[in-house]
Image (cartoon, rainbow, N blue to C red):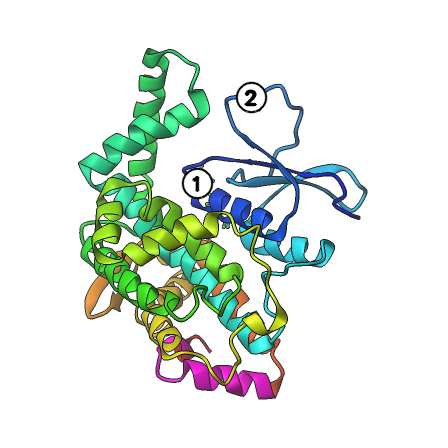
Amino acid sequence: MSIDESLLVRGAPGSPYTRKMLAVLRYRRIPYRFFTGGLWSDDQDLPTAKVELLPTFYLPDATGELEAVVDSTPIIRRLESEIPGRPVIPEDPVLRFLDYLLEDYGDEWLTKAMFHYRWYYEPDIEQAGAILPRWRALTRSTEEIEQLSTFIKERQISRLYVVGSNDTTAPVIEASYKRFLDLFAAHIKNGPFVLGRRPGASDFGLYGQLTQLATFDPTPVAITIERAPDVHAWVSIVEDLSGLEPSDDDWFERDALPETLGALLSEVGRTYVPVLLANAKAVDEGAETMTTEVDGCVWEQTPFPYQAKCLQWIRQEFVRLDPEDRDVVGDVLAGTGCERLF
Ligand SMILES: N[C@@H](CCC(=O)N[C@@H](CS)C(=O)NCC(=O)O)C(=O)O
């Protein structure tokens, strides 16, 4: 099975995971064909995925038949194994683990801030409501677009619970985004990427969410530009890294990781880790609500089965390490709160 023709990808500009994957493809110099649903997709006879998510990749299955594939994290790994060159997964297993953890933090925690800011405050709701429908219906009448806008707004606001955004958690999410900005701005001074002078999957995970938080939705954009202009600029740089020429020694050395990386991991341990653990427990027990504390504040949300799997996958990555590497990872994580994952 090989991916020999240029890849076909369906997505949307307002979808953080779509932006994540397009940036990976550009950096890896993998030719692709991208289309947004609605505008010119309907004439394509394409398979559908079991769970329809953006982005959707159309890839050959074991028999060579085209199938719809979703979920950016495993797709990145599949592309790595089938298309050589310019990898985004570090060779050093210690770095590979840290990269995995931070990619997951971007995908699963930072996305809470992304979805929260987009659908919580009026100016953000209005802007997203006006633009998102146009990305898939640009040529339709203003009236039709208005209808689509109302539909999208109502649907998305009604789904805030999925990421755990509510009046109780709003201050926690917002404080966490601001701390992340400060820590990440400090960290990229040592990079400019998460793990050195070349990007890993974690960069693209964070980038995907930041394309929205730092450059689209008005409330978090204003916060980002005021607080962390470096992060705003970083997003535009990561968008197209096709001209970067990485070399093997561009990754950090495992025994010379900058302190700013530890600080970032402490933020993961302070917020994402307690929620991951409480969520997995609630999913396990079939509870209707999960409640925990993040940073001394109450965190309450409906359990999210997918994130229970995320915890399992992180643990698998850890268990897969050989004992010596596991010890090194343990040392890096010690005191960050992330050690509670294992
Ligand atoms: N874990 C998936 C998440 C993808 C995802 O949640 N995509 C969103 C858009 S950014 C989506 O399609 N949501 C379902 C919907 O809007 O109906 C990935 O990494 O690709």
Q: CA distance from mark 1 to mark 2?
A: 18 Å
Q: Residues within 10 Å of mark 2 (few under 14, many from 20)?
A: few
Q: At 55% across and 55% down in the image, what residue appears?
A: 73
131 in relation to 310, above or below: above
> What is the secondary structure assignment of the residue under circle 1?
loop
Q: At 59% across and 69% down in the image, what residue appears?
A: 90
Q: Is residue 124 magenta?
A: no
Query: Which amino acid, mark 1?
Result: Ser
- Does the residue at mark 1 contact the one at mark 2 (Cβ under 8 Å)? no
Residue occupied by mark 2: 40
> What is the secondary structure assignment of the residue under circle 2?
loop
Would you say the magenta stretch is mainly helix, strand or loop? helix
Query: Which amino acid, mark 2?
Result: Trp
Question: Is residue 270 in sight in this rendering?
Answer: yes
Magenta part of the protein: which range? 324-338
Q: Is residue 86 left or right of residue 285?
A: right
Q: At 46% across and 55% down in the image, what residue appears?
A: 205
Q: Is mark 1 within 8 Å of ligand 1?
A: yes
Q: Which of the two discs, 1 and 2, labels the residue nearer the N terminus? A: 1
- Rendering coords of residue 268 (x, y %): 36, 68
Along the viewing direction, whichever of 107 and 312 lies nearer the viewer: 107
Q: Which mark, residue 298?
A: none
* Image quadrant where residue 339 sits: bottom left
Residue occupied by mark 1: 15
* Image quadrant where residue 143 sits: top left
- Rendering coords of residue 269 (x, y %): 35, 72
Q: Is residue 6 left or right of residue 144?
A: right
90 in relation to 85, above or below: below
Along the viewing direction, whichever of 106 and 310 lies nearer the viewer: 106
Q: Is residue 336 magenta?
A: yes
Question: Is residue 286 in sight in this rendering?
Answer: no
